[in-house]
Image: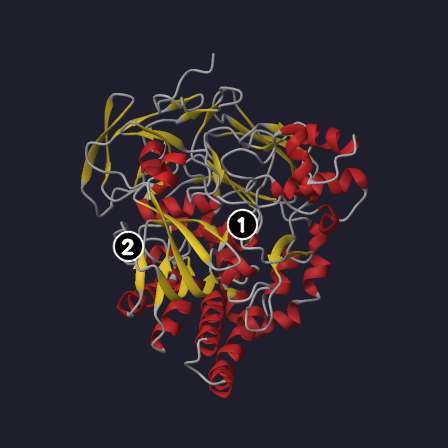
Amino acid sequence: MKARYSLVVVGAGPAGMAAARCAAAHGVDVALLDEQERPGGQIYRSVDDSPLSDPSLLGSDYLYGRQHVAEFRNADIDYFPGTTVWNLDRNRDVSVLVDGKSRGLGADRIVIATGAQERPMPVPGWQLPGVMTAGAGQILLKSAAIVPPDDVVLAGSGPLLLLMASQYLKAGVGIQAILDTTPRSNRPGAVRHLIGALESASYLAKGMGLIASIRQSRVPVYKEVTALNAHGDEVLEAVRFNSRGRDHELPTGTLMLHIGVIPQVHLAMAADCEVRWDEAQLCWRPGLDQWLCSTVPGIGIAGDGAGIVGARASQLQGRLAGLQCVYELGALTRDQRDLKAVAIRKTLDKHLAIRPFLDSMYRPSPEFLTPVDDTMVCRCEEVSAGEIREIARLGCQGPNQAKAFSRCGMGPCQGRQCGSTVAALIAEVQGRKISDVGYYRVRPPVKPITLGQMGNS
Amino acid sequence: MFRTLTTVRRNLIRFTLDGQFHQAPAGISVAAALLTAVRFSRRSVVSGRGRGPYCMMGTCFDCLVCIDGEPNQQACMVTLREGMNIETQTGIRDLDTGTTADMD
């Protein structure tokens, strides 16, 4: 690893790989840092080293990643897997942790491509062993060929949950039930976006195919699920819920939750990039111009980390961010950049046309945004929704002050699992907007690092 | 318990979990291996209740374990290796010894 690069890209998912490839193809000196051992991000986990004898059960969109990863590996890029970025500042100084040792590197340009994380789905009992995210289940299938016991219950809403169910069925996993928490009231709003979504007809076709395959499998699907909670003494033993007015209880040892994904913005926030509340996607996302430049000079943000767009759109955004870096570094003229971007933007628009439909169709139920009092909101420090509501009533002004009141957000996950919920609860109690309540102040290190590791540089 | 698909294309390797021998396919994460062996892999530093892997992608820190004597390792971010000694964690890390101690 050199002390300085023209471009440093963080994250080896579709956006990061594309940004790095684009820059390298124009002769830019580029390093790509990624926390995982292999390229591909979460979406293409293990795509070039699948433990599955038949990876095609994961679907053609997954297999598409093979070519992308192969081209990335062949490009002239200094690729550093197993490298955790623990800080980035507004002067583009990067701090990384490799093999237990910390070191720094500088960059003329940065592209942050840290992708998405699962939107926290706090329900009573979600901290019990046996409850995990659907994304976790998918990572286990892709990277380890490991599947849950045949009594698994999938609960939540959104395309990934349907995809997950279909992949499990193809892998021979017996799904006990699917609990669909999509509110019926989402439909009229979603239908209004259906015409626009026809631009992304392949997504609609794929979604309908998934729904048909699940219907064919005869796995019980409970609709309009509310009052979802996980029960157990030491580990998960049962899931209780209401579906269309009737109470149900299913005994199970494994519950997989999913209500969409949200951008991972901690690294961007550490670098002082401005983030804004997005009411359509119900998440914080960085403020960007049409070239994906953040509010901090020299730092671009592409892919799901900039707002949820999906894998293919992320790849296209990565190319745009890459082109912009090449232009800013002087290897392309403005006209050359603009010309190359025309076709990319045209394809990107096609992939983005589905988003307003998906965002409104699968908008999470308020039950999961502001959960009932006995739900553990901060999993690390074990702070309940009731405690957050209580400190909000006492006049706590926002998530940062909530830390001092309750320690919420001060555990090892640094607020990644509770930040959005804490803000929503304070907003609910005080009748304010989430954009006004705000988010945690993100400070370095953005990933936990020991003093020994920091000193061992 | 989670299971490995019978068609998996990997050799099995051995590791110990709290002194007991287990086997899992090479190349998978420590957290994936844990899920095939135990129902939970640490106790919360606050309440002492059981916790297990939740996100599998490094964001939740619920899969922290002690690996070859080094505590607070994210099991989902470490690749399982032959002969690894993994210990479940109870309580917080002890500053002097680097090992974890009981809470009370």
Q: Amino acid at mark 2?
A: Asp
Residue bearing mark 2? A54
At horizontal 36% and vertical 53% (from top left) the residue drawn is: A45
Under tag 1, what secondary structure?
helix
Residue A266's label in the rendered image is 1
Circle nearer the N terminus (1, 2):
2
> Where A78 sits versus A148, above or below?
below
Farthest-out residue, top: B104
Q: Cα distance, mark 1 to mark 2?
A: 36 Å
Instruction: Indicate the chain on which mark 2 is placed.
Output: A
User: For the C terminus of chain A, which image quadrant?
Assistant: top left
Could you say which quadrant of the image residue A175 lies in? top left
> Where A316 sits versus A56, above or below?
below
> Where A384 sits versus A155, above or below?
above
Q: Nearer the viewer, residue A447 or B43?
A: A447
Residue A258 place in picture, x, y as percent: 54, 45
At horizontal 55% and vertical 69% (from top left) the residue drawn is: A292
Q: Amino acid at mark 1?
A: His
User: For the N terminus of chain A, which image quadrant?
Assistant: bottom left
Q: Nearer the viewer, residue A195 or A265?
A: A265
Residue A249 place in picture, x, y as percent: 58, 29
At horizontal 62% and vertical 62% (from top left) the residue drawn is: A287
Please name which of the two marks, 1 or 2, marks the residue nearer to the observer: 1
Could you say which quadrant of the image residue B39 lies in? top left
Task: Say left or right for A258 vs A224.
Answer: left
Under tag 2, what secondary structure?
loop
Q: Nearer the viewer, residue A160 or A7?
A: A7
